[in-house]
Image (cartoon, helix red, strand yellow):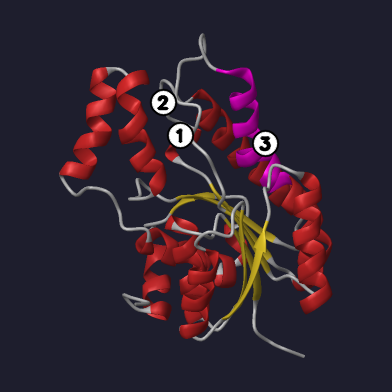
Amino acid sequence: MDQRKIAVVTGASGGLGAAIACWMGKDSAIVVLVARSRYGLDDVAHHVEQLGGTALVKTADVSKPIACQQVVDRVLYQYKRIDALVNNAGVISPLTDIAHVDIDQWRYALEVNLFGPFYLTRLTLPSLIITHGRIINVSSGAAYTPIPSASAYCASKAALTHFNRVLAEEEPNITAISVRPGVVDTPMQAQIRHEGSETMNATQYAYYTDLKARNQLEPPEIPARSIAWLALHAPHDMSGEFRNYNDPDIAGPALSLYGSTFK
């Protein structure tokens, strides 16, 4: 029986998700790369395998329960078990105030950011209970800090974080952790800078543009290293917690295990 860890990572075609998958590749894991489009996934898969892992590419819109079912069915058919799930896929749109937001866009954000993790959690639980596996829910500081013009994102991340707490209480045989990845230099931040001038107040928009200008955004590889370590190695006593990626008891062991780069 293959002893390598089998991990499902959503939102894996770029940014944080791709970096998480690459760190897992360095850990010799079998990584199931999930994204709505195949664009970018094959490159990530190649990188994972260059680093010593095995990659399986699966396109799926996690807002659709049937698509999530197909991912899980494929993994279980091919590998017979799942050891870790990283719910990383997310959208920040719509970026506008509540009074003017498009209802369908608002609902879709909840479907991706909250319902997707729920579907995949529900579907992977039978296997994860057997393997004493781990679920890592990528949350945000927006779970507790209100961001004007980002109500769907804030609401979904707050709900996801509390969902994680309930999950940990209900399922003592798995480890469920939600993580704040910090302010990361990803396409989501680029979207804020591109669209925010039209929807955010001047002070708020300047905050995000200044982060980029002052090189204050964290490279995806840094929080991704912590998240990969949590997914494959987190101790069970962290279950139910909402942790920062740079907490010393997470970032330290992750750096020690993986080193400073996967390039």
* Depth check, front residue: 46 or 243: 46
Q: Amino acid at mark 3?
A: Glu
Q: Amino acid at mark 2?
A: Ile
Q: How many marks?
A: 3
Marks 2,1: beta carbons within 8 A? yes
The image quadrant where one finds the N terminus is bottom right
Q: Residues within 10 Å of mark 1 (few under 14, many from 20)?
A: some
Residue 124 is situated, as x and y percent measured from the top left of the image, at: 77, 60
Give me the disc on residue 142: 1
Residue 189 is situated, as x and y percent measured from the top left of the image, at: 36, 41
Give me the disc on residue 25: none
Residue 108 lies in the magenta stretch: yes
Residue 122 is situated, as x and y percent measured from the top left of the image, at: 79, 51
Residue 61 is situated, as x and y percent measured from the top left of the image, at: 67, 48
Read off the magenta span.
102-118
Residue indicated by mark 3: 111
Q: Amino acid at mark 1?
A: Ala
Please say if 180 is above or below 28: above
Residue indicated by mark 2: 147
Which is more N-terminal, label 2 or label 3? 3
As helix, strand or loop, the secondary structure at mark 1 comes to helix
Q: Residues within 10 Å of mark 3 (few under 14, many from 20)?
A: many
Q: How far apart are labels 3 and 1 at the CA level?
A: 17 Å
* Left or right of 7 in this view: 119: right
